[in-house]
Image: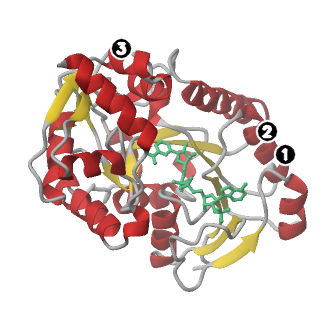
Amino acid sequence: MTALKVLFIGGTGIISSACSRRAVAVGLDLTVLNRRTTTTRVLPAGVRVVQADVRDPASVHAALGAETFDVVADFIAFTPQHAQTDIDLFAGRTGQYVFISSASAYQKPVGRLPIVESTPLRNPHWQYSRDKIACEDQLVSSYRSHGFPATIVRPSHTYDETLIPLMGGWTDIDRMRRGLPVVVQGDGTSLWVMTHHDDFAKAFVGLLGHPQAIGDSFHITSDEWLTWNQIYHLMAAAAGVEPVLLHIASDTIAAADPELGASLLGDRAHSVVFDNSKVKALVPDYVAAIPFATGARQIVDWYDADPARQVVDDQLNATFDALVAAAR
Ligand SMILES: NC(=O)c1ccc[n+]([C@@H]2O[C@H](COP(=O)([O-])OP(=O)(O)OC[C@H]3O[C@@H](n4cnc5c(N)ncnc54)[C@H](OP(=O)(O)O)[C@@H]3O)[C@@H](O)[C@H]2O)c1
């Protein structure tokens, strides 16, 4: 059987690196296109790397010529312009085009749980999510009018060892280790879903070249539901400390730091639970097998392995100190 010929735009990112490994492991003929500037993650042997900047379509044309693919997946399209560039580049040259959207596109506040793919898309709080929705609209329209073979994939919070899911990133781990309180939104009891990138990749690669995925959308997440308090405690346990959690309303945090506020009010302050049965219908062996207790240890081990990775954000620290002082 001839291997599926696949192009990933990205391929060495948090999510796409695991997809590259999985694609090679299941025997796909994988090309990745990127600028060759990300060196944190090593591609497996057998991947062809093409250097181009996807924000400069001429460089993509120059790198790929008239080549055709069975599947093109773009991991780094964020605006309708990016989606249009891909439609212009790949219409008639690929059997499937996969757009990486975001589960943050689902309506906020969430109207009904669990979230299914037909949950309305609306996010008044976060421009990033509105842009992803606009990309999706454009691709759906292009599929309807011209048969552009788009598949939309919506990851939720998907991590590798480099991604600390806490509001303050490494700054929070550093605070925990110094015995300082860390700020947790709300009362920490809202539900969240953390998906390991190796788990995500299993379902994602199963959708590649799948004829029933064309024109359709899927989220891919773990089935492990955790409260934010549990997530902070698991990270603290991995860091070898007992944390002091200080609960502060998301609105109050947003008033102190609008950027943190957008990602809270537009995303992580809302309880989410996902029904993954749609992707499982097409990829029946998909099971998310890595609990966050394991993932948390991988993350802390990675940061502990090299002090250069342990960057404390002084401005964020000052924001947290002010919030803690005001709360007390
Ligand atoms: N992680 C999450 O929790 C989450 C949740 C929802 C949605 N998402 C979506 O997932 C996607 C991110 O995927 P990821 O984690 O694999 O990406 P990533 O970690 O942001 O990595 C970016 C990848 O794209 C390449 N790249 C960046 N700019 C480029 C350019 N101008 N031209 C060509 N290549 C470029 C990078 O390689 P070079 O630097 O070498 O070019 C790297 O391979 C985004 O669309 C995001 O919205 C993520």
Residue labelled with disc 3: 251
Residue positioned 49% across, 64% down in the render: 19
What's the residue type where badge 2 is placed? Gln
The answer to whether the residue labelled 1 contacts the one labelled 2, judged by CB atoms less than 8 Å apart, is yes
- Tell me the quarter of the picture where residue 112 sits: top left
Q: Counting other residues with Cα less than 10 Å from the Cα at mark 1, is it few (<14), some (14-19), or many (20 or more)?
A: few
Q: Is mark 3 within 8 Å of ligand 1?
A: no
Residue 88 badge:
1
What's the residue type where badge 3 is placed? Asp
Residue labelled with disc 2: 84
Could you tell me residue 152's position as x and y percent? 56, 41
- CA separation in Å, label 1 and label 2: 6 Å
Element under disc 1: helix
Element under disc 2: helix
Judged left or right of residue 118, residue 284 is left
The answer to whether the residue labelled 3 contacts the one labelled 1, judged by CB atoms less than 8 Å apart, is no
Element under disc 3: helix
Which residue extends farthest left?
242
* Along the viewing direction, whichever of 26 and 257 lies nearer the viewer: 257
Could you tell me residue 318's position as x and y percent? 38, 33
* Along the viewing direction, whichever of 93 and 194 lies nearer the viewer: 194
Would you place residue 130 above or below residue 7 in this image?
above
* Along the viewing direction, whichever of 320 and 14 lies nearer the viewer: 320
Label tally: 3
Residue positioned 69% across, 70% down in the render: 36
Q: Is residue 65 visible in the rendered structure shown here?
A: no
Could you tell me residue 275's position as x and y percent? 30, 35
Could you tell me residue 129's position as x and y percent? 55, 28
Q: Earlier in the sequence, mark 3 or mark 1?
A: 1
- CA separation in Å, label 3 and label 2: 36 Å
